[in-house]
Image (tube, rainbow, N blue to C red):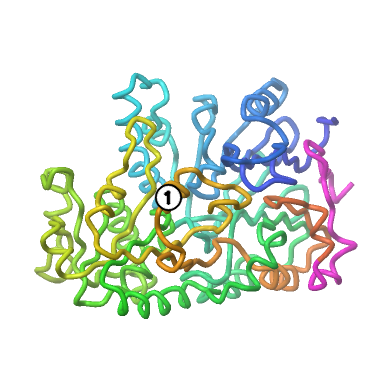
Amino acid sequence: MRYDMDGIRIYRGINQIGGIVTEIKKGDHRVLIDFGANLPGTENAELDDDELVKEVFSRQEVKTDAVLFTHYHGDHTGLKNRIPEDIPMYIGRIAKDIMKIIAKDADYVKIKNGQADKIETPVIDRMIPYWRAGEFKDLNGIRIMPLICDHSALDAYMFVIEMNGERILYTGDFRAHGIPGEKNFEKLVREKIGKVDILITEGTMVSRVKEEAVNPIRTEKDLKEKAAEIFSRHKENVVLVSSTNIDSVMGFYLATPRDKAFIVDPYQARVMMTAIEAKHKYFPDDYRYGNEIYVLCPNENDYCIKDLKEHMIPGTQRKPFHMARPDIYLDKGFVMLARPNRNPYVSTGKFEERLMAMKDPHIIYSMWTGYLKGGKAEDPSVVEFLKGYKPENIEVLHTSGHAYVEDLKKLMDMTCPDIIVPMHTESAAAFKEPELFADYSDKIVTLERGDMLGICSGLS
């Protein structure tokens, strides 16, 4: 494995989804993009996490000037605790706030169970918010411009990189059919990116074309409209959705009929508040307060939402957050965002306990179908949550967090790359299979894990 040239190296993520780490190297300096843990259920991982850490940081002849995180999902940030403390780490400001909300409860459980050495909040505190989006920063000859993009994680980034006279686009995880993407994707590419020499792109959906072909929910707008129709027909609606998939969370919230209660737990409420206050200015129709938000409190003690209860909707005298009491929502009808129990120290989760008190819950499953029983990455906690409910009481309502093949093609057409490097895909070689990519088949370069794509005064 050569290490004496300038260029791009993908340590992990060429033929697997998640666990991503990419290096941009110039001379004896480098920048890393993402440092993710392998996703649960990853088969034939290119490297295990310990091997990855050793391989990336064993070399002393190169200085790591920064680690840039594209977004907060664990398959991109999960190994942040393993990064040496003297290396600056960058992430979006809103993404950092959300990571701290995520870490708060998890850290509490770890401390309670004698795992204080694994808490994440101090590591997140060290992270530095990106400089102004759309502007370059020079890191020892590697010029980086962060650009906010659409993904199922709020405040996600792609990067334009300039080095040795070449212009590179590193997409990270992105899509064009969420709230920001439908409105801004083409404008972003046209005005901020333009022509590139090298396109390093995620390709999650290349292996899921058949799966998506039968899914009528193509966009977050479709999801919101369909949800409104379902909620109007059922009194008890329970939605299984990732709490940090903010576009979908906001869609379910704003689709809730006014005569029904919208219910979340304190963690979900704080994520929603952070998202609304950060994005309302840019997307006022999609990130706003609508119905009152009822918050589930342990033992009906509202101490856990004391800070939320003091919050006022800007420009009004309304308080959006209220404690959820069963006598209110069970009688009124509701939409409840739920999460499967992932706490190994309790046998029954708080949402499962509340499900037992419901008469006829209608379950909306709004996550990748691969987590379901018999799926590609079956998730035991999801399977357990849904156990006992008849198929007719479970409805799949989900849209992907990743770019469809046609949007990948649109990106290629708009950036006219000379080289295309696939990653974050189950098979990089499969990029040559879609008919839509036929015009670019001779430009697709499939790297082997750890190979360097040289960038030395032009490509070599």
Image-based side of 248 in relation to 429, left or right: left
Image-based side of 123 in relation to 350, left or right: right
Q: How many marks?
A: 1
Image-based side of 10 in relation to 263, left or right: right
Quadrant for residue 9, please give it: top right
Residue 447 painted magenta? yes
Quadrant for residue 21, please give it: top right
Q: Is residue 424 above or below residue 442?
A: above
Quadrant for residue 29, please give it: top right
Q: Nearer the viewer, residue 84 or 120?
A: 120
Q: What x and y, as percent, mark residue 213?
A: 65, 73
Residue at x-position 83% and y-position 64%: 433
Secondary structure under tag 1 reads helix
Residue 208 painted magenta? no
Q: Is residue 185 above or below residue 26?
A: below
Q: Nearer the viewer, residue 272 or 430?
A: 430
Image-based side of 219 in relation to 277, left or right: right
Q: Label 1 sits on what residue type? A: Ala
Q: Image quadrant for the N terminus?
A: top right
Q: What x and y, as percent, mark residue 380?
A: 49, 43
Give the residue pinned by disc 1: 95
Q: Nearer the viewer, residue 394 or 100?
A: 394
Q: What x and y, as percent, mark residue 119?
A: 38, 28
Q: Nearer the viewer, residue 168 or 223?
A: 223
Residue at x-position 72% and y-position 30%: 28
* Neighbourhood count class around disc 1 (C-alpha, 10 Å): few under 14, some 14–19, many 20 upward: many
Q: What x and y, as percent, mark residue 411?
A: 69, 69
Q: What span is in magenta?
A: 434-460
Residue at x-position 24% and y-position 67%: 334
